[in-house]
Each structure stands twice: as C-alpha cells, then as structure tokens.
Amino acid sequence: MTAVTEGIHLDSVERLATMSAAEVDDLPYGFLILDRSGTVLLYNRYESRMSRLPPGRVVGKNWFREVAPCTRVEAFQGRFHALVDSPTALVERFSFRFHFLHGAQDVTVQLTRAPGDADRIFMTVVRRSVGGAEVDLPRAAALNEHIGAIVGPAGVALPLPARTIGVLMDRVGLAEAHAIGDALGHSIASAAERDAALVGEESIPHAPPLLRSGVLDASLASAGFGRIAIDLSARETTGAIGIVLRAPSVTSSKGLIAFYEGLLASLIGRAIGEPMVVRSLDMDEATTVPWLLAAVPSASRGLLDDAGRVEADIVSRRLGVFVDEP
C-alpha cells in the first residue's frame, strides 16, 4: 500500500523494510526507525539535512527526550504511544510544526508498524509546502502596525520598531543594558524551569543536554527574543559553552550586544547551575545573523576579556567552541 503526502510519493511499508542503507538515504523525505521506547535506530540523510543534526548525534538517543523535546506532547508522543500500545492500530498520520534555530518547519508525520516486527515503528516526515512552494522565514524583524509589535523569525518580540531597541539600549549605557538583559534572562529562565517540570525533569541543570537546550530555546522564542542553539562539547575541557543566537532584530548597536550578553549570562547560568559570563565573539555591532557568543564560568572570565578585540577564530580555538573538526 502506498500513500501520497503533499505531492511526495511515500513508498510502501514493505518496500521501506527491504531498502538498503543507500536507498534509505536517497529518499526524498525524512525516514526514521524507532523502537517501542522511542530510541532512534535509523535516521536518514534527508531528515538529517532538514533538522541539521548529524546521524551520529541522533541514532541511539531517545527521540522524545534527547533529540526533539518539542515532540514530547500529546499531539506527537501521545499518538506514538497509542500506536505502540494498541493491538490493532497500524498507522498514525498527523501534521506537526518543528521549531529549529534556522526556522519553523511544518511537516506531515506518518507512524507505521514495521512489517512483522511489533517492536519497531517506521516514521516518515514530509515537509509541507505553503501555497505550493517553500516559504523562507524573514531574516529580520519588522513592525506589524496592526498589533503594534515587532514580528520576525521568532514571532512577536517587543512593541517597538526594530531600530529603536538598539537605540534605547545605547541610550541607557552598556552597564544598564547588561543589567536589563540580566533581569529579563532570569524571568525567561523561570519560565524554562516550569517547562522542564512539565516534561518531568526535576530542574534544567539535571535535564539531558539536548532537552536542556531545547527548553531554553523554546522559552526564549516564546518571550519573543530570538532562537538559540547551545554547544556544550567544550564544557568539560575549557569550561566554555558555545551559543548561536538568531535575534529578532538586526541593528547596529553595542547596547543591544550588552543587553543580550546579560540576558544569556543569566539564562545559561540558571541552566548550568553556576554564574556565567557571556561575550560576543564575532562582531562589534549587531548587524549579522546568526550571532556567535561564548559563555564561561564567572571565575574564568579572563578567557573572554579580549573577546571582540581579536579575531573570532582565535578566541574560538582558545575556548574550543565553533572549531571545525580536523
């Protein structure tokens, strides 16, 4: 039996079960295999490209807890368990929206029992077109006069024109802009703590790294202050954390940089469980997206003292963040 989803022909379940690894990677849609607990057994190349997560970071991890925490809701995980637990159900098909750093993606998901193996679930993920073609999200925010707020890649931001945010932060001075960001970061962190509790985690610092990053990203986006991705790979060696930020407004403002450094320092500090210092790595003015920043424990702030005054790759290599593998 075959199906057509948003113009994409889905191969039959029987055909998927007999495909080679190369054939699976050549599929024009996402294809995953999960076990009954949600652990990822297979993750094809299309899905890797869509999510921008390499298979090595996904296979063997729990889809709902460690890979895509945003799916840990009744509309997705609930349907998965309903299929797994039912003695007769064969297919679940539904629409879903994934929120990635590079933008939201609407998809159609189909969950199907693997032929002859009740312990495996085939999952196909098809990107849904809007108006017959893919639509890129705006890279910069703009004032929506109907609601009196900035609307951009992260949704509603502040009730001010984008250029005004940086002007205000410059006017109050760098120290005050940093303090405003710090206070806001604590408020967003509190919301993130509540979100972590809703998915069964004792606190953000005790959550798995990918879930921790996902909760912080979702809370920041919900508040209208952009999207973040967090790289914890260097933390065990240099104590540093890499941060990629897509802010909802792009403007020439050192005050805006100070604002986000304060915001992210308090947000990341609450997530890690110790005071942190954040510095922008690759700019003196906030005119490009995404932004690259680094966080280190307050006791190691000397590592960031010259960030912004030397080339970004020098600081990155010193800290072990955003460094390409040899």
Image (cartoon, rainbow, N blue to C red):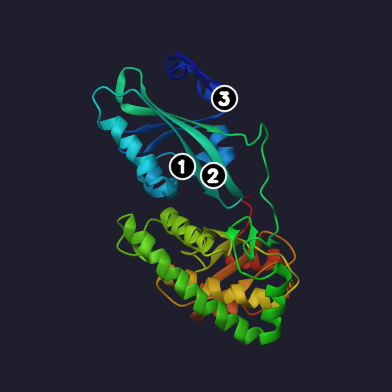
Residue 24, how many percent across, how many down? 52, 24
Q: Is residue 119 above or below residue 262?
A: above
Instruction: Name the residue rendered at 51%, 43% in the picture.
Output: 97
Give the residue pinned by disc 3.
Answer: 27
Dot 1 and dot 2 residues touching (CB under 8 Å):
yes
Q: Residues within 10 Å of mark 2 (few under 14, many from 20)?
A: some
| Residue 175 falls left or right of residue 188 | right
Judged from the image, the secondary structure of the residue bearing numbered disc 2 is loop
Report x, y in % for residue 32.
45, 32
Instruction: From the viewer's side, name the closer residue of 232 and 211.
Output: 211
The residue under label 1 is which amino acid type?
Val
Query: Label 1 crowding class (10 Å Cα cut-off): few <14, some 14-19, many 20+?
Result: some
Question: How far apart, in angstroms, are the residues tagged by discs 3 and 2?
Answer: 17 Å
Q: Which residue is mark 1?
A: 58
Q: How many marks?
A: 3
Residue type highlighted by circle 2: Leu
Local SS, label 1: loop
The residue labelled by disc 2 is 53
Residue 51 visible at all: no
On-image quarter of the N terminus: top left
